[in-house]
Amino acid sequence: MGGSSTASGTTSSSTNAINAGGASSSLHTLTDAERHQLQHWFRTVDKDHDGHLSAEQLQSVLLNGDWSKFNLETVHLLLSLFDQDGSGTLTLPEFENLWRYITEWRACFAQFDDHRSGTLRPSQFKRALRAFGYGLDNDDLVALTIRRFDCGRGNREITIDNFIQACVTIKGSRDAFNYLRPDNEGCIRITYPQLIRLVMNDSSLYRKRR
Ligand SMILES: [Ca+2]
């Protein structure tokens, strides 16, 4: 369900990294047909009919280009980004915002998947990171990122779920680095509590400079 049926993309393509945030008006605008389809999928996977999708229910509707399910780690990451009321589940409006976000990422991914294989090779992934301005031109760092996010497949290729997770993670680290470094210097000094907040991806890092 979903998955590559939308991978062809109905959005304008972009080489900009995509900002998380459910209410962003810059995300793909759903057509009436898409909204109707999403409502149908939501009702189908919401098997207990409580109006909320759990992580496991959400996973069943998120597919990679090779029809494999999104890995659960990415699903939890996405859920946390769009669970605006903090319920630990997604309502239909939250799910629609998540879908708009993923649609934008699919369009980004497709720009670098030259062979339409549904996966990015290291060279394609490196081009994407460069286009997003992530400053990861170092081959060792690219290889490290692929090893971290290919979920043990060992094939050195990146599916869309791992692509999203990798980009969100790198962007979070880059944003933290830029926030903490003084006057555009190339290095930062970081306290232990800040380091823990950074590793935990805690937004309070940006409010507590200690
Ligand atoms: Ca929620």
Image (tube, grey):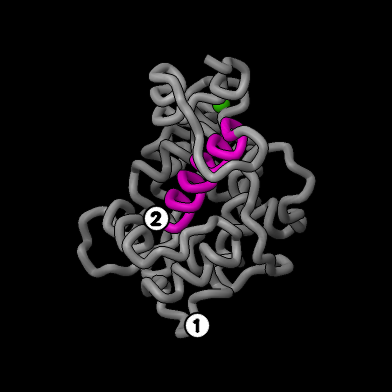
Q: Nearer the viewer, residue 88 or 179?
A: 179
Q: Amino acid at mark 2?
A: Asn
Does 173 lie within the magenta span? yes
Magenta part mainly helix, strand or loop? helix
The disc, 2 or 1, on the residue closer to the chain's N-terminal end is: 1
Residue hosting label 2 = 162
Quarter of the image where one finds residue 206: top right
Q: Nearer the viewer, residue 74 or 55?
A: 74
State the residue at coordinates (52%, 14%).
210
Q: Position of residue 183 (x, y in %)?
A: 67, 37
Q: Which numbered tag is attached to residue 114?
A: 1
Residue interval drawn in magenta: 162-181
- Neighbor class of circle 2 (other Cα within 10 Å; few <14, some 14-19, many 20+) is many
* Side (left or right) of 62 relative to 155: right
Task: State yes or no: Cβ of the residue under disc 1 lies below 8 Å from any atom of ligand 1.
Answer: no
Q: Position of residue 38 (x, y in %)?
A: 61, 50
* Side (left or right) of 97 relative to 171: right
State the residue at coordinates (34%, 43%).
72
Q: Position of residue 44 (x, y in %)?
A: 49, 46
Q: Amino acid at mark 1?
A: Asp
